Amino acid sequence: MEHIPLEEWMMTDCKHCGKLMIENHLMDRRLKEVLTIERVIHTVKTDMVIHTEKTKMMRLVVEIEYVGKIADAFDKATGSFDGLKPEQVDMNYVHALNEPYLHEIRVVPNVHIIEEQ
């Protein structure tokens, strides 16, 4: 069995932990953004539709992904991707919404409702 100096072992472990922390942070950030999206906006240019439906105890979030765009790019201030407002979407591309590919379904408890009860 090979002896590994403590400093080298700690550095290796920290690199691994750092990578896991970054991955977890990105997932937490994405989950937080998905949970904060209340209004459904169809922006055809980016080929992604995010649909949010509220129920009494939980919110069902269905993300339909066409090309691989991620939800982190969503601009909540303008309600669009890359500053493109929904009314500016070229309607020639609406046919892209006719054949959605289901990418992922998540059921997330609504923390605010649970805390209130």
Image (cartoon, rainbow, N blue to C red):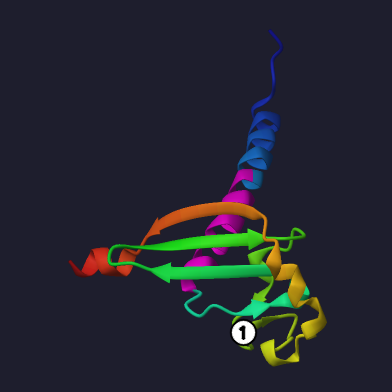
Residues 104 and 35: in front is 104
Q: Which residue is mark 1?
A: 79
Q: Residue at x 27, y 68 (%)?
A: 113
Report the magenta residues as a range: 20-36
Residues 47 and 73: in front is 47
Residue lying at the far top of the rendered structure: 1
Quarter containing the C terminus: bottom left
Q: Secondary structure of the magenta portion, mostly?
A: helix
Mark 1: few, some, or many residues within 10 Å (few <14, many ≥20)?
Answer: some
Q: Amino acid at mark 1?
A: Gly
Quarter of the image holding residue 75? bottom right
Residues 8 and 88: in front is 88
Q: Residue at x 43, y 61 (%)?
A: 60
Residue lying at the far bottom of the rendered structure: 87
x and y percentages locating residue 84 in the rendered image:
74, 86
Q: Is residue 4 left or right of residue 52?
A: right
Secondary structure state at the residue bearing disc 1: loop
Quarter containing the N terminus: top right
x and y percentages locating residue 116 in the rendered image:
21, 70
Q: Residue at x 59, y 82 (%)?
A: 76
Q: Is residue 16 left or right of residue 95?
A: left
Q: Is residue 75 left or right of residue 31?
A: right
Q: Is residue 34 within the magenta segment?
A: yes
**Would you place residue 87 above or below residue 44 in this image?**
below
**Would you place residue 24 above or below residue 2 in this image?**
below
Q: Residue at x 63, y 35 (%)?
A: 13
x and y percentages locating residue 71 in the rendered image:
64, 66
x and y percentages locating residue 58 in the rendered image:
34, 62
